[in-house]
Amino acid sequence: MSRLAEFRAAEKALQEQLAQLESLKNDAGLKKEIEFEEKLKKLMDSYGKSLRDVISILDPKPHKAGAPIAAAPKQRRARVVKVYHNPHTGELIETKGGNHRGLKAWKEEYGAATVDSWLRG
C-alpha cells in the first residue's frame, strides 16, 4: 500500500472515530453515567474511602478471581437403577451404584466382567 493510500485510510478512520465521539457526547445515558461517576468519586473522597472499600461494603463475600459471581449450585443428575440377573440362581439385584452387598459377592464369586454382562438394559 502506498504512503498516500495509508494516509487516506488513516484520515478516513479518524473522521469515523470523531463522528462516533460526537454521537457519544450527545448521548444522554453517557452524560448521566459521567455525572454519577463524578459524584461517586467526590463522595468517596469526602469519606476517605477507596473503590475496594466501597465494594467490600456493598458485597462483603469475597469472590475468587475469574469465578462466576452468582453461580447456582450444580445438581447431579439422578442415578439410573441397574438390574442384574444371575442366570445361575435366577436372582435379581436392583441397585443405583456398585456398592451393593449381593453384587459384590457375585463379583467375587463369578468375576466383575461376568457379572457386568448380566446387566439388563
Image: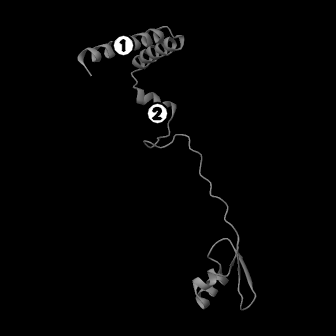
Q: Nearer the viewer, residue 50 or 9?
A: 9
The vertical placement of 79 against 37, above or below, is below
Residue at the image position 62 percent from the left and 83 percent from the top: 104
Packing grade of label 1 (10 A; few <14, some 14-19, many >=20) is few
Mark 2 neighbour density, 10 Å: few (under 14) some (14–19) many (20 or more): few
Q: In x, y percent, where is residue 50? A: 39, 25
- Picture coordinates of residue 26, whole percent (x, y): 49, 7
The residue under the point 44% across, 8% down is 22
The amino acid type of the residue labelled 2 equals Ser
The correct choice, above or below, for 65 with respect to 101 in the image is above
- Badge 1 is on which residue? 12
Residue contact at pointers 1 and 2, CB within 8 angstroms: no
State which tag comes first along the sequence, 1 or 2: 1
Please identify the quadrant where the N terminus is shown: top left
Mark 2, residue position? 56
Quadrant in the rendering for residue 70: top right
